[in-house]
Image: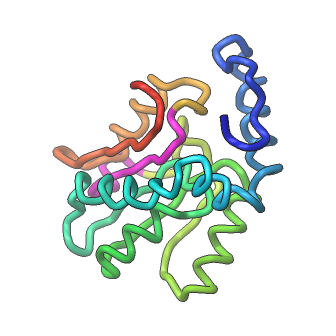
Amino acid sequence: LETGMTSTPMRNRADGEKGTFVREMFARIAPRYDLANRILTGGLDGRWRRRAIRLLAPPQGGRILDCCCGTGDLVFGLLRADPALDVTGLDFCAPMLQRAEQRARRHNRAAHFLEGDVMAMPFGDSHFDGATMGFSLRNVVDVDATLREILRVLRPGARFVSLDVTKA
């Protein structure tokens, strides 16, 4: 369990409750989220993100979406791998996005961060050349709706890589 999370199974909560619970939980832990990830994974999360980016194999200079981007770890990893990428991070938790934007300014990284819901994204069909999601699929309200929406915004043949520490 991540710092600040309860052991109450999410599948037993009503959809609206789960979304509110998850948003509020991440808002509370936003200031210490990065440190918690490093501790809870024994520092392996960085290696896992690099592997996810290699598996994504984004086209040089491509347009990439990081769903549930949180504080931007995958966004910044993508930009380190290819500074020419056009990377957008989407998250529904404003405090997490604020941390991501602060990090982008501090490290002079060109990334776009947008507040939004992965089940109803504000992008046109076939808009992205690839997409990632890190440690988040278990927290969405409706996994099937999320995956359909990701498929909708990806160009045909584009890859989606979901990084997580739970079974699919």
Quadrant assignment for the C terminus: top left
Left or right of 138? Residue 130 is left
Residue 97 lies, in percent from the top left, at 67, 62
Kindly give the residue lying farthest to the front in the view shown: 42
Q: How is the image coloured?
A: rainbow
Residue drawn at (45%, 47%), measured in percent from left and top? 133
Residue drawn at (43%, 36%), measured in percent from left and top? 149
Residue 78 lies, in percent from the top left, at 37, 68
Please tell me whether residue 167 is drawn above or below residue 75 in the rendered image.
Answer: above
Q: Quadrant of residue 80?
A: bottom left
Residue drawn at (58%, 65%), measured in percent from left and top? 113
Kindly give the residue lying farthest to the top in the view shown: 12
Left or right of 83? Residue 8 is right
Kindly give the residue lying farthest to the left in the view shown: 157
Q: Is residue 129 magenta?
A: yes
Residue 15 lies, in percent from the top left, at 69, 20
Q: Quadrant of residue 22?
A: top right
Q: Which residues are magenta?
A: 124-137
Please tell me whether residue 68 is drawn above or below residue 65 in the rendered image.
Answer: above
